[in-house]
Amino acid sequence: MTSPPLPQVVIVGRPNVGKSTLFNRILGRRQAIVGEQSGLTRDRNIAVADWNGVAFELSDTGGVEWREKDGLAAAVEAKALGALDDATAVLFVVDGREGPVSIEQELAMELHRRGLNVMLVVNKCDDWKTAEAVSADFAILGIDPTFGLSAEQGHGVGDMLDVIVRGIPDGPAEVTEADGTIRVAVVGRPNVGKSSLVNSMLGEDRLVVSDVSGTTRDAIDTKLQVDGQDYLLVDTAGIRRGARQEGFAEMVSVSIARRRMARADVALLVIDAVVGLSRQDRTVADEAQNAGCGLIIVVNKWDLVDVERGDQRSWRKELAERLGRMSFAEVAYTSALTGDGVPGLFGVIDSVAANRSRRVPTGELNGLFEYLKERGMQGPPGSPELKYLTQAAVAPPTFVIFTGKGSRELPASYRRYLENRLRRTFEFSGTPLRLNIRQRRRRPE
């Protein structure tokens, strides 16, 4: 039985009034990027929040400016206003230090016209004793109730949340993570089509897409269900090497992207089919491998590849050679623009997630180990004597090899050999494996 949708609470306002700071404060964690630079939020950032046992979905939106804009700014504003369509409540955030401005009067008129349940949030009232007087300056906007608060310090936020949840219809009383949800992080270099791919997977134009490199800054969570399987898609900022990162916003974006990869079950590394696998792509693949999540190389923009270059088998061979130790990755070919290959991507995700959670029965594992010993495959000269092999964990699959005397490491070539045998025998494609060496302790006589 599908749970009813959560009430929608949407945060709107002009740029740099503290919307993302309020978003983070309500969630109790840093999910949205905040800083002094105007316009850091571009996509609609959605997360589930809870106050006094009442759950609701909270949306942070890009700044509304009501003026002639370029393509990217217009797209950001369209997403912000589009988020109002299903809003249960709207938090209209203004800057208490600056007073009302004409842009906010126009936005207030638009909110009144739509007949929405709006609450005015006068932010940056760091002196709570004067918050009421500061809030009175915004009476011209004609919005009631009004809350003077400081999202940065937390003053007054609890009082606002009390009013919000009182107006929310009865719904789920607690927030729980759906069992079996597959977390998918969409990663890659800037401008390879990550947001376009997520939109194509969702079947709707949810994320801002632009030719401007680095359009996505926050890590945007989106839930969907396909054939009864729940997914959480996370579109992340483009990851570039440290020396190429530009400014505070991008450094924080990259940090968030890496943290999300560490929590993901599967990472979709999106590469540009026209450019091929670059050095930066290998860096991102290495990050995913270190994070321990499953890895799928998504060759996007496949529709732009010449017919002569369109042999997927030759592509797969070349990718495996260039990926090196990450050659375990699965490969999928898509066009986010036309939708080709996108529906089949979910089957690959399911397979990789299952492989990452696979536990090999002890008997089968011992059978493989005894087979290797009988064939004399104990490693090159100088290798420690191998006693037995056991699986210690899943997600990612982790194996412990117990050895005899000495604490010598296995040669790298032999580690690769054992890893490949495990992959071929027990179907671990798409997932990294961990091999740990441990000296077997002797029992005291």
Image: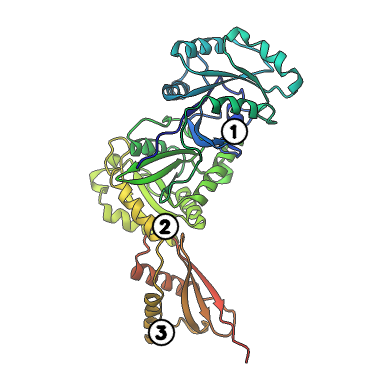
Tell me the distance, in whole angstroms, between the alpha carbons under discs 3 and 1. Answer: 58 Å
Tell me if residue 275 comes above or below residue 384 in the rendering. Answer: above
Q: Nearer the viewer, residue 28 or 306?
A: 28
Callout 3: SS: helix
Residue 330: x and y, percent? Answer: 35, 55
The type of residue carrying mark 1 is: Ile
Q: Residue furthest top?
A: 140
**In this picture, residue 9 sits left or right of residue 348:** right
| Residue behind mark 2 | 323
| Residue behind mark 3 | 373
| Residue behind mark 1 | 26
Mark earlier in primary sequence (2, 3): 2
Mark nearest the camera among 3 and 1 is 1
Tell me if residue 326 comes above or below residue 111 in the rendering. Answer: below
Which residue appears at 63% of the width and 31% of the height? Answer: 35
Mark sitting on residue 424: none
Disc 3 and disc 1 in contact, CB within 8 angstroms? no
